Amino acid sequence: MQTVKTAAALSKSLSGLPGPVVLVPTMGALHEGHGELIRHARQIAGTQGTVVVSIFVNPTQFGPGEDYTIYPRPLAADRQYCKSLGTDLIFLPSAAEVYAPDHSVFIEETRLSKGLCGASRPGHFRGVCTVVLKLLMMTRPQMAVFGEKDWQQLAIIRRVVRDLNFPVQIIGCPTVRESDGLACSSRNANLSPAEREVAPVLRKSLLEAADAAAQGETRIAILRRKILRAIEKNAPNAAVDYVEIVHPETLDPVKKLQETALIAMAVRFSKTRLIDNILISTPKK
Ligand code: AMP
């Protein structure tokens, strides 16, 4: 496994490695969720192809006062983990390598980015789209793998790639969870023991709503209220940022449940903001 730190070195290394090239963009502090993405990348690259994992804590996607400076950076463990999963190349650029001091170009998706996390984190998706496009330009992979845990991000990246005619296949992977249902996240480590204990209520409340939908409940207000009540009851100190029921692709709010919808949520435990989502469906006919 090679590690390269510049776009020039990445390009040089890739010119000697066989395709297909599959990219897994991450911010490091790797956990089982990232692990699943890398395993999937290894599988679709085949024994011949090349798996590239990028590790870059992207400053432009963090707002003022967010956790950019304290975001965990356990590099030695990340490298070891990537190696154990059959990664061929780690791309580990510095912020100065990715952004020229006078950089002035951003990529902005203007529709799907408006609601959900986009509403509470202004500029976040502009930073995400910019860095992802830059990583795609630098790596020129045939495929890139992203997690469904960040459903809105995945939908936005698909849109960017489609609307800019970027020649890459975007592949989504299901959310990986701890044994109690909490979605794996680098930020889980920031929860206090008491917060960690109650955090699985996010998943439980989503499952309850999915269950109600499967039993025939189509009223959005009722489904939302179920979730909010469960969180309030089990995690009274948590602050709900949003719980929304939206169309899975357009991310437009759904007025009444018809067929399939996505419930997406963001909840704060002190300074730790966790997100999760679930697809729900009306009863099968
Ligand atoms: P991050 O390092 O948090 O920027 O995440 C890098 C990639 O890993 C993104 O595509 C995320 O959606 C994905 N990811 C993060 N957590 C999980 C998880 N629990 N299950 C599946 N994918 C995940």
Image (cartoon, grey):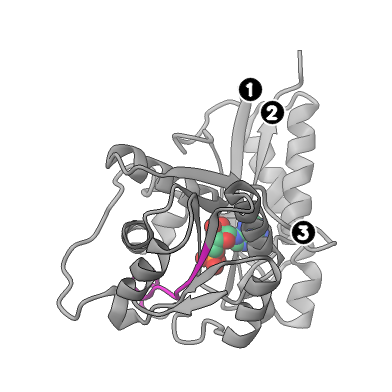
Relative to residue 124, is residue 231 drawn left or right? right
Hey, what amino acid is under mark 1?
Glu
Query: Which amino acid lies under the numbered mark 3 shown in the image of this protein?
Result: Val
- Using residue 249 as the reference point, say whether residue 123 is left or right of it: left
Q: Nearer the viewer, residue 99 or 1?
A: 1
Q: Residue beneath label 2, please?
A: 281
- Which mark sits nearer the N-terminus, 1 or 2? 1
Front position in the image: 147 or 195: 147
Q: Which mark lies nearer to you, 3 or 1?
A: 1
The residue positioned 77% from the left and 28% from the top of the image is 214
Tell me residue 97's x, y (percent).
30, 79
Q: How many marks?
A: 3
Picture disc at residue 201:
3
Residue at 69%, 64% (x, y): give it: 184
For image coordinates 81% across by 72% down, the residue present is 197
Read off the magenta span: 52-64
Q: What element carries label 1?
A: loop
The question of residue 54 being in magenta is answered with yes
Q: Give the mark nearer the N terminus: 3 vs 1.
A: 3
Query: Residue lying furthest top in this view?
Result: 285
Q: Which quarter is ligand 1 in?
A: bottom right
The alpha-carbon separation of the residues under discs 1 and 2 comes to 5 Å
